[in-house]
Amino acid sequence: MSQETKIYKTGLTMALFPNALGFGFTIMKDALTVEIAQTVAVKPRPVSNAKAMKKIREKVAYYEPDTIVIEDYQKSKKSKRVSKLLKEISEFCKERNIDFYTYSRKDIRFVFSNFNAHTKYEIAKAISKNVDSMKDRLIEKRKCYEGEAYVTGAFDAVSLGITHFYMTD
């Protein structure tokens, strides 16, 4: 059955967070129930939006979420490539009649300020304390000369999903 003719609800929300490696994604039932959270690397380098969209389409077809959540590409300070990918994802959702929501980094920080978490690391720490499936995935705070850890994409996606549930409840 194609996405356009889907007549049942899965109750799943997918949050997608594109980054330099590819994208982080999560499947959630509610703010504290994370079914899966992963970072998907898009290879070979450099990352292309066509390759990333192919993988995103595969994930959407497999999980069949009712809702997709992405970062607001109009308010994002992301690279041009990532901003274009976010716009492509929103167009994909419109074509498939999938509900989608966008939130800015400011929205994420607002939600997590309730947990006294303001930086990416503090947000990841708050997530690992409150979401059972993320407890063992927290890594040490990175040094100023280190790049982001691979797992960061998964935490970014979960933070976006939690923001969605917070803002829509």
Image (spheres, rainbow, N blue to C red):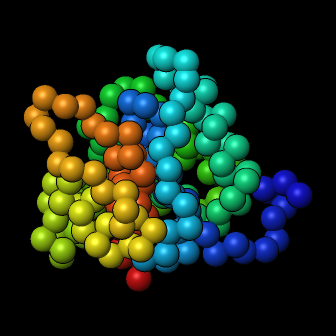
Q: Where in the figure is residue 8, as x and y percent of width and height?
A: 79, 74
Q: Nearer the viewer, residue 88 or 147?
A: 147
Which residue corresponds to the image point at 72% horizontal and 74% vertical from the top-left? 9
Residue 30, horizontal then vertical, whole percent? 49, 77
Which residue lies at the image location 52% right of the left edge and 40% below the top edge?
40
Q: Position of residue 56 (x, y in %)?
A: 61, 42
Asked if residue 13 is positioned above or below residue 16 in the image, the reply reads: below
Q: Residue at x 38, y 46 (%)?
A: 151
Q: Position of residue 145 (x, y in %)?
A: 13, 29
* 121 vs 116: above or below: above
| 66 relative position to 40: left or right | right
Residue toward you, 91 or 37 = 37
Work out which quarter of the rendered image holds the C terminus and state it. bottom left
Tally of numbered discs = 0
Using residue 66 as the reference point, say whether residue 28 is left or right of it: left
| Residue sitting at x 69%, y 59% | 63
**Which quadrant of the view contains residue 58?**
top right
Q: Is residue 130 above or below residue 140?
A: below
Residue 151 visible within the image: yes
Q: Residue furthest right?
A: 1
Image-based side of 57 in relation to 48, left or right: right
